[in-house]
Amino acid sequence: MADNFILIHLDPADNIAVLRAAAEAGTVLTPDGLTIRQDIPIGHKVAIRPIAQGEPILKYNTVIGYASQNISPGDHVHNHNIRFDTIKEVYHYCADYTPVPILPAQEQRTFLGYVRPNGLVGTRNCIAVTVCSNCAATVARKIANHFTPEILSAYPNVDAVVPLITSSGCGLEKSGDPMIYLRRVLGGLIKNPNIAGALVCALGCESNNIDNFFQEAGLVPSPTLGRLVIQEEGGSRKSVEKGISMVEAMLSLANHSVRQEVPVSHLKVGLECGGSDSFSGSSANPALGKAIDLLIQNGGTAVLTEPTELLGVEGALVRRARSPQVAQKLIDIMRWWLDYCRGKDSQIYGKVTPGNNAGGITNVLEKALGSAKKGGSTPLNDVVGYAEPVTTPGLNIMNSPSYDPVSAAAMFSGGCNLCAFTTGRGSCYGSQHFPTLKISSNTPLYLRQKDDIDLNAGAVIDGEKTLEQMGQEIFDALIEVASGRRTKSELFGMGGDEFIVWWLGITA
């Protein structure tokens, strides 16, 4: 039998292609004239020429592994015949660095944002109820949950009261990375311009002492920053009552804020992907990259995270680095992860998640090709640590684990006021304080999860739009969301539990 399934040829040098639809054994693909030799699922790879055992498998003209056996044209190419091996890179620092010409001010796009006294601009106007430790979790959640949509209707300029609750905060060593990361995330979220006011709840005796935390983070109690200690208030019930009154006072102040027209250069967009499939690297991620190029041309900032998903493409990013120092910071992070994960069953040493694998991604080298495309083509201007402030315009990389809520929390605390999230298998991540535009890589997913996903980059796979057209659509949508248009995840009320801090180290 014959069918006109269209193969996606990603680069003329590739020895594999990707199937736009599932194909049964015996199917002849026209006009390629390739006969499928086994049943192959949608989005998976097929050999388009003979590949000898030991020969590199090329996708986007990049090595994603080596043939573990002889492979014939028409063969399914996946776990059973690809051998993973790390690739030794020779790094050429800054070899491809070219500064981005920023558009003149009069030509730059604008959005409607909340201008804060310090000059930063928020895309949302929220009150955060957070904790120093999980010991205060129920108190904080009860305070936040008191403010129902009916109550908040009296404050039309306030978007939400959100509980941001961590599972750690006590039993930690009192110094070192676990405490540093926790305090950095908590301090950064309070300072994010999307947060008009914050109430910090504590039990009072935890390792993350509230007064030490305030001092270290440079925080001072004020009408828009509350300090609530359960042991000082006489217990949980009294603390909830006190906390509700404190948030009510903040709501009145926050409601005075109104949106103003400001340049897009005030946008800091966090880039995330979750539940990726093989189409992610062909549609959603490169289309988002086109949007990010437009954002940076307008003076904006983008943050790429999860360096464990950049293995194999870090050399290209190093070539685009603004300086040898920036390049070295990325290499140092990559080496740290390789050392940290040595001997562990983690994706940086080959295996991706079961969902990634089912979607046609064989290993982390292949996954990295798509992950990096979210960042577009502009120079790498800076590399920062987990949840550190992002202060350099243009493309940045932030260190974080490859776990969506952990990296999203870090980007928000680093100053990002908007999130763009691509998915190929489906993801439910989102939040009210960190508005998240969800983009599907394929049309079937978009049709299945319309209540979760805002845009369908599957139109690129379907041949209905070019990457450039899809990128422009994503850029326009980011501006609309920044100006107040609700995302699907906001409409559903996501964000009360999708907040996790990277918890390294021991408990004691």
Image: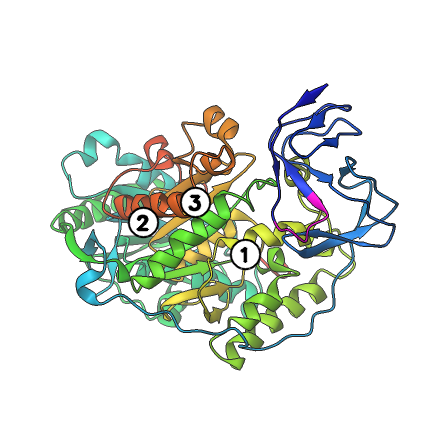
- Label 2–label 3 contact, CB within 8 A: no
Query: The residue tagged with tag 2: helix, strand or loop?
Result: strand
**SS state under label 3:** helix
- 47 to the left or right of 467: right
Residue 411 in the image, given as x and y percentages of width and height: 43, 57
Q: Which mark is first along the chain, 1 or 3?
A: 3
The amino acid pointed to by label 2 is Ala
Mark seen at residue 372: 1
| Residue 59 position in % (x across, y down) | 67, 50
Crowd band around label 1 with a 10 angstrom C-alpha radius: few (<14), some (14–19), many (20+): many
Question: Label 2, on which residue?
Answer: 128
Considering every residue shown, the one lying at the far top of the view is 1
The magenta-colored residue range is 11-16
Which is more N-terminal, label 3 or label 2?
A: 2
Between the C-alphas of marks 3 and 1, the distance is 36 Å
Circles 3 and 1: CB atoms closer than 8 Å: no
Quadrant of the snapshot with the N terminus: top right
- Quarter of the C terminus within the rendering: bottom right
